[in-house]
Amino acid sequence: MEKEILKEFKRMLEDFMSELQNKMENQLNQLNINKKESIKDHREDIMSFDLRLFDFTELQITKDEFIADFKKVLKRSQHRAMIIVPTIQNIKDLEVYNVRSGVYLSIACSIEIAVEENEQLYEELKSLGNLDIRNYEERDRWVFLRDGEELLCALVGTHEDNYLVFHTTDSTHIKILSNLATDAWLKSRRI
């Protein structure tokens, strides 16, 4: 288990370093440094690059990558979880059937009840008894709020596999960012 975590961390670090190198190369290219000029002449511009404010716009994160994390967080649920996903079919990917019966799930997603497969899945989920499911048309986010203690979010970008993904257990972050879940829940409708 520990080796897997270290391997995953190493992979994430390598991805980050690759993205960082690309970002720095882009920044250097933007400075229009030609071969005759010295980098020393542009030291201030180069040093203004701030690692703390990394631009994640072009970072490619696949749906499978963050779904794996969603599953891990879901398994840690003890009392209540709020799940916002684009479509009801995405619920199958999260393995909500494996959640302990004592955990109450609030799910908001686009359902399209006219599609027979969606209607069957909707009825199957309702029969579990430990969840409330609502229709949320937006399809713009994946949010998982666990017990008010952990938040995992993947915001849909303009391109495939372009998600802004973040995960926090900081109570102040959760207090502010939980609106991503509650806003979707309040906009959703019962069927």
Image (tube, helix red, strand yellow):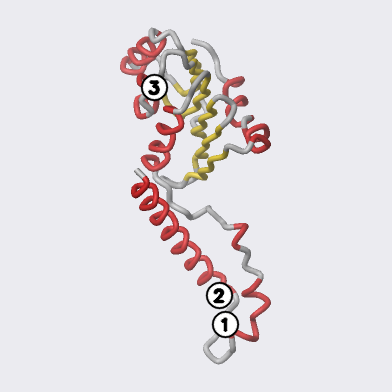
**Residue at the image position 58 percent from the left and 28 percent from the top:** 181
Relative placement, left or right, of 96 versus 140 is left
Whole-percent x, y for residue 28 in the image? 55, 75
Callouts 2 and 1 close, C-beta under 8 Å:
yes
Q: 71 or 189: which is nearer to us?
A: 71
Whole-percent x, y for residue 165 in the image? 51, 43
Mark 2 / mark 3, whichever is N-terminal: 2
The answer to whether 55 is drawn above or below residue 108 in the figure is below
Q: Please name which of the two marks, 2 or 3, marks the residue nearer to the observer.
A: 3
**Which residue is labeled 3 in the image?**
96
Local crowd at mark 1 within 10 Å, few (<14), some, or many (≥20)? few
Mark 3 / mark 1, whichever is N-terminal: 1
Mark 2 residue type: Leu
**Residue at the image position 59 percent from the left and 88 percent from the top:** 38
Mark 2 / mark 1, whichever is N-terminal: 2
**Which residue is labeled 1 in the image?**
33
Mark 1 residue type: Ile
**Which residue is labeled 2 in the image?**
28
